[in-house]
């Protein structure tokens, strides 16, 4: 496999470009522990307009180049792009004759689903580049083998995730929100956070389902959002707990963790509100914490 500095350039070869959007978990309920060791969950997730970009080009010298926010992102067979591509090639019974350029804008270990979205973009892109004509059901099947969040990114922008995240219910949700992402300089390990998660009666257990109520205003919806992984994530990384405490409640806005962290977010109806809140928060948090304003797709 070739790496970043050794890719051949076949400029006139057929190519496909796909964007890989991030996501936030507006709610995340832990329902119990499964016999396979995973946690049973129910989560309302929305895709956001902060996204990676993946270019795929037919090549006699396949490889993977990664640029942008590369910290913690492998540029070899461990990358989900390459693993997804190998799955498709094996299922299609053809060689992996593609070079990939992955431009990373989603930080690794931030709970924004970057790796999973990259994998889904690979499945969708190769289906087009190779002219496979596979239905979404076949792509879902491969996606579920790659990771819990991957099936969501194959489908719609708003979804309820169940099981370990692989069972996807698409929501017809046209509401648009702005979010202020609070992205620390440190990542969090998903496995480590889940290992610390203690399933108990005190967890929300999925009883709160704000997507069913059709709430459209952020000030009403915000307090209804939750993430049962927060106690475990804050235990794993006390600095994240301190960051949450510094931001939560400013101007009456609730701040939540997305996924297993490390990113936090607050929800707004208008871009101006998000900008004003970000300015108020900036002086209360460390300078190495990144604030990013995004919108839902």
Image (spheres, helix red, strand yellow):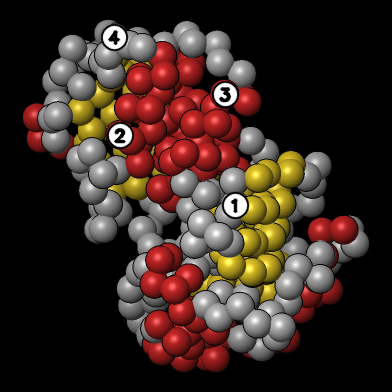
The CA distance from mark 2 to mark 4 is: 19 Å
Decide: few, some or many residues near mark 2? Use Cα within 10 Å; few <14, some 14-19, many ≥20. many
Report the number of numbered marks.
4
Q: Nearer the viewer, residue 268 or 132?
A: 132
The CA distance from mark 1 to mark 4 is: 36 Å
The CA distance from mark 3 to mark 1 is: 17 Å
The CA distance from mark 1 to mark 2 is: 21 Å
Mark seen at residue 165: 1
The CA distance from mark 3 to mark 2 is: 18 Å
Residue 153 lies left or right of residue 225; in this view the side is left
Evaluate if marks 1 and 4 touch, with contact meaning CB atoms under 8 Å apart: no
Q: Nearer the viewer, mark 1 or mark 2?
A: 1
Among numbered discs 3 and 1, the one appearing first in the sequence: 3
Please report the residue visible at 14 percent of the width from the left and 35 percent of the height from the top: 3
Please report the residue visible at 42 percent of the width from the left and 30 percent of the height from the top: 122
Decide: few, some or many residues near mark 1? Use Cα within 10 Å; few <14, some 14-19, many ≥20. many
Q: Looking at the picture, does residue 23 appear above or below residue 215? A: above
Please report the residue visible at 39 percent of the width from the left and 83 percent of the height from the top: 237
Mark seen at residue 136: none
Residue 249 at x, y percent in the picture: 66, 88
Q: Is residue 48 visible?
A: no
Q: Nearer the viewer, mark 1 or mark 4?
A: 1
Q: Which residue is mark 4?
A: 13
Q: Which residue is mark 2?
A: 82
* SS state under label 1: loop
Evaluate if marks 1 and 2 touch, with contact meaning CB atoms under 8 Å apart: no
Residue 169 lies left or right of residue 9; in this view the side is right
Among numbered discs 1 and 4, the one appearing first in the sequence: 4
């Amino acid at each position: 496999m070739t790496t970043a500095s050794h890719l051949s350039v076949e400029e006139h070869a057929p190519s496909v470009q796909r964007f890989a959007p991030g996501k936030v978990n507006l709610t995340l309920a832990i329902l119990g522990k499964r016999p396979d060791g995973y946690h049973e969950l129910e989560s309302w997730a929305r895709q956001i307009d902060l996204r990676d970009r993946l270019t795929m080009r037919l090549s006699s010298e396949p490889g993977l180049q990664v640029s942008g926010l590369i910290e913690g992102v492998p540029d070899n067979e461990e990358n989900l792009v390459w693993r997804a591509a190998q799955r498709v090639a094996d299922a299609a019974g053809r060689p992996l004759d593609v070079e990939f350029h992955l431009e990373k804008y989603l930080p690794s270990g931030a709970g924004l689903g970057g790796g999973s979205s990259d994998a889904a973009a690979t499945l969708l892109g190769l289906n087009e580049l190779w002219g496979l004509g596979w239905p979404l059901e076949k792509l879902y099947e491969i996606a579920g083998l790659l990771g819990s969040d991957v099936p969501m990114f194959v489908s719609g922008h708003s979804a309820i995730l169940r099981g370990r995240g692989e069972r996807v219910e698409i929501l017809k949700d046209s509401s648009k929100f702005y979010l202020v992402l609070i992205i620390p300089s440190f990542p969090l390990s998903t496995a480590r956070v889940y290992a610390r998660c203690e399933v108990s009666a005190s967890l929300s257990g999925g009883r709160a389902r704000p997507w069913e109520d059709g709430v459209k205003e952020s000030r009403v919806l915000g307090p209804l959002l939750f993430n049962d992984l927060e106690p475990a994530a804050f235990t794993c990384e006390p600095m994240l707990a301190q960051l949450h405490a510094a931001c939560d409640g400013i101007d009456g806005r609730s701040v939540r963790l997305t996924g297993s962290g490390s990113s936090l977010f607050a929800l707004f109806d208008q871009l101006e509100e998000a900008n004003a809140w970000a300015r108020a928060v900036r002086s209360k948090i460390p300078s190495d914490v990144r604030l990013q304003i995004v919108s839902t797709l």
